[in-house]
Image: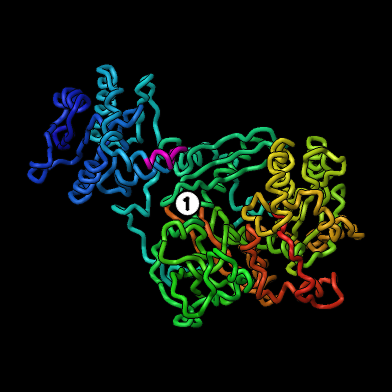
Amino acid sequence: MAGETRVGVAGNGMLHDAAMSLLSPRHRVERVDPENRDDRSVDVLVLIHDGWDREQHRTWNDWCLDNEVSLLPVYVVPGAALVGPVLSAVDEGCLICVEGRRLRARNDVGDFGKALDAEPLRMATMGADWLTALAADLVATLIGREVDRLVAGGEPGPMIRVALDSLRTSTHHWLPDPLCERCGRLPEDSREAAVVELAPRPKVAPDTYRVRSLAGEQDRLHRVYVDREAGLLRAVYKEGRSVFPSASSPMGLRATTRTEVGYGHQTNFAASQLTAIAEGVERYGGIEPGGKRTVVRSSYRELGDEALDPRVLGLHADELYDRPGFPYPRFSPDLVFNWVWGWSLGQERPILVPENYAYYGTVYRNTRDHPFVYEISNGCALGGCLEEAILYGILEVAERDAFLMTWYARLSVPRIDVRSAPDPDIPLIVGSIESFSGYSIEVFNITVEQGIPAFWVMAVNRRGMPDMPQVLCASGSHLDPVKALRNALMELGPLVSRPAEFHRQQRPRVERMLADPYEVVSMEDHAALNGAPEVFDRFDFLLGSPQRQTFQEAFADYYRGPRHTDLTLDLIDTVERYRRGGLDVIAVDQTTPEHRAGDFRCVKVVIPGCLPMTFGHSRRRDRGFARLYRVPHELGYYDRPLTDADINPHPHPFP
């Protein structure tokens, strides 16, 4: 086998010389350089430098791809030597992918990127100052092991990092980048690819609403997605003082120094870390198209019935467009922008959706188009199959729609007696929050006309705890009422756990928001403003509600009804609830190769007519929703349809 595999070595320096001394007696080795490389015929190229010359990397990477030569890069960055990963000539991925992943995995990506741009020569050479003869021998040994593996026909190995201060080694896994400028091969987005054919999906158990449990997959998912050197997610951190174990998983983004974070709040750290990983991977799908290449660019007027009318998604109020610096253009049917294909489950046909609506992070890369409305991760969801992802996307839309319907219409919804919950954990969770935080917990049933269980949970400062918010709010939704309430309580836990000093420092900003609601610009601002004692009376419509319900009274249909063993039947029933009310359910498949690596599917669910969550009072979207005026009357909270004068003008308290 050794005589059949031709090994080329390119580069120079201490590492190069040490590797040549080790490889030459064991393999058929040829020196390759820019002058003779087109005359050489090799199967694998070992590219070795004592520094980090990105231009050389790009040049040799292109040559290997063009000539179908496997590449083993070896180079030195500040503080470490990197061996690999082996980049196969027949598999996906290249050295540009690896370096992109490495940069985005850094916590200091902004400052580090500036240093790379400002002083590329210094950054390329400074790593060599750390090299010693002992380090060079160790790295050469690792190179020899990787080449031996390749020659023997073994699987390519991961990236190996050698810390040059301690000579400790670590291995690092990475995922090829489907958006890589050099090797990415995304298929075009198309009408045909948008078709969703629902298939039977047996559930783990009738009341689980999942097709698989992730509980036994923590090690595998961590290996696939989490790596401090080159992972899609940088790390998974255990969060500090909180009533429940919490975790976070940050992810660097392309074309920006912003970081997206997945969070997990559960009753044990293992589950919280799994949730943080899953949420981080979900957020990756919503940032930009990573599974298909957008090809439709047109106006709504030109597309006609093939496209969703953007006006049914809800626009900003006319007066907002007149505010100085308002960043969103008025919508016009003649506006030209990108569109992506989705699938209408109600109409059973492909339909075009504005790209900036289906992917909330495209503004970072697509500088031609500014979104015509503010949109976030509403309806984005991850699942073990497409049907599961769509179902949970619907549930998120349902939760936020119910919360905003309750707030905008000031619905005096009934309280729920948590002691009546069929699961004894629920009153224990409520008791844990109350004893840990000193807050009193109120639970409200905010379920709207589709009958999907939804809860608003509120922590009320009845003890007069100094500097602590008077009110903190969260919500949750699920087909199972107990799971819906549990979700809401898990979201509330971290909010009540923040210390008084945190809120004391926020007070000057709160005072500015009290004076001008348009000072509310971030998600955190909404909770901070509404926790102020000066606006406590804004919650009178909830806290003054005379209605009381048990779980059995509020959700009698659920507890009397049968349970499906097939998740697809749950999805079909849920879509039908919206269809009966004249609402369509549209799914845009956001699944990328990275999602498939973990056996996941990812979607954005759009339900035109449902109220969209927004953050920042100037970004509020509550115009054009007939349901907002009609449904409160139909549910019996009003004796007439609402008018504009009835709509709550204040920033919502969603956290």
List the residue tagged with mark 1. 595
Q: Nearer the viewer, residue 616 or 44?
A: 616
Residue 106 located within the stretch drawn in magenta: yes
User: Measured from the top left, where is residue 414 in percent x and y?
Assistant: 86, 59
Q: Nearer the viewer, residue 94 or 322?
A: 322
- Magenta part of the chain: 105-114
Q: Is residue 336 left or right of residue 269?
A: left
Question: Quick check: 317 above or below 652?
Answer: below
Asked which secondary structure carries label 1, the reply is helix
Question: Quadrant location of residue 121?
Answer: top left
User: Measured from the top left, where is residue 75 in percent x and y?
Assistant: 27, 32
Question: Quadrant location of residue 454?
Answer: bottom right
Q: Amino acid at mark 1?
A: His
Q: Is residue 650 left or right of residue 566?
A: right
Chief secondary structure of the magenta portion: helix
User: Measured from the top left, where is residue 126 in percent x and y?
Assistant: 29, 29
The residue located at (29%, 36%) in the rendering is: 154
Q: Is residue 3 left or right of residue 551?
A: left
The residue located at (59%, 71%) in the rendering is: 322
Asked if one can make out residue 149 in the rendered structure from this viewpoint, the answer is no
Residue 83 located within the stretch drawn in magenta: no
